[in-house]
Amino acid sequence: MDCSHIQFCLEQSKINLEQLQKLLEIGAFWAKNRTIEGLSIAIANSNPVVTVWDRNLLIGFARATSDGIYRAAIWDVVIHPDYRGNGLGLKLVETVLAHPQVNKVERVYLTTTNQRSFYERIGFERNNTNTMVLYNNTCIENIYQHQTSEVF
């Protein structure tokens, strides 16, 4: 595949949310039910956000969150299935890692289900961590109410 016309972009304002939603639907089983509103919020709270374009078609996406010094996390890495195997995923992740919000942090985290070997080739290591997950958003509200009642 000729990829000479493929472009990488860091401008959030150029993201077409409908195209992004479609890309996630066909290219990421873990993001099939993402809403336009949710994507808009996630993008607004991420830096960098990197998109990959074949002319006017969105074919790749990744974003990161970072405190700029200690920790960063990479999220939602996806390349359109028709464009996989051409090195675009590698370049996408490298673009995120090279960004000033990410390139100097002590640790960069990511979560993957089926692509561990891909990320290991980039330099990520498997680890045994103490990572925990809270799935129920109502728990956060209960914790906040509990903490504020103790303060007064």
Image: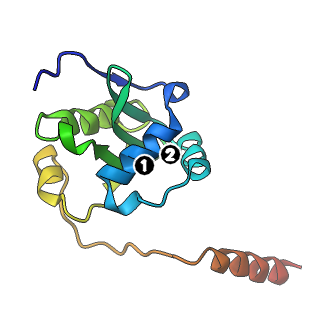
Indicate the secondary structure of the residue bearing disc 1. loop
Mark seen at residue 67: 2
Decide if residue 108 is in sight here.
no
Q: In this view, does 37 lie to the left or right of 3?
A: right
**Residue closer to the observer: 56 or 64:** 56
Residue extending furthest toward the top: 5
Indicate the secondary structure of the residue bearing disc 2. loop
The image quarter in which residue 35 lies: bottom right
* Residue 54 % position (x, y): 29, 24
Tell me which residue sits at (38%, 50%) in the image.
24
Three-letter amino acid code at the position of disc 2 = Asp
Quadrant holding the N terminus: top left
Q: Is residue 85 left or right of residue 23?
A: left
* Residue 77 % position (x, y): 32, 47
The image quarter in which residue 22 lies: top left
* Residue 8 % position (x, y): 33, 24
* Residue 64 % position (x, y): 42, 44
Q: In this view, does 148 lie above or below 27?
A: below
Tell me which residue sits at (38%, 53%) in the image.
25
What crowding class fits label 1: few (fewer than 14 Cα within 10 Å), some (14-19), or many (20 or more)? Answer: few
Tell me which residue sits at (42%, 49%) in the image.
70
Quadrant holding the C terminus: bottom right
Three-letter amino acid code at the position of disc 1 = Tyr
Mark seen at residue 70: 1
**Residue closer to the observer: 38 or 115:** 38
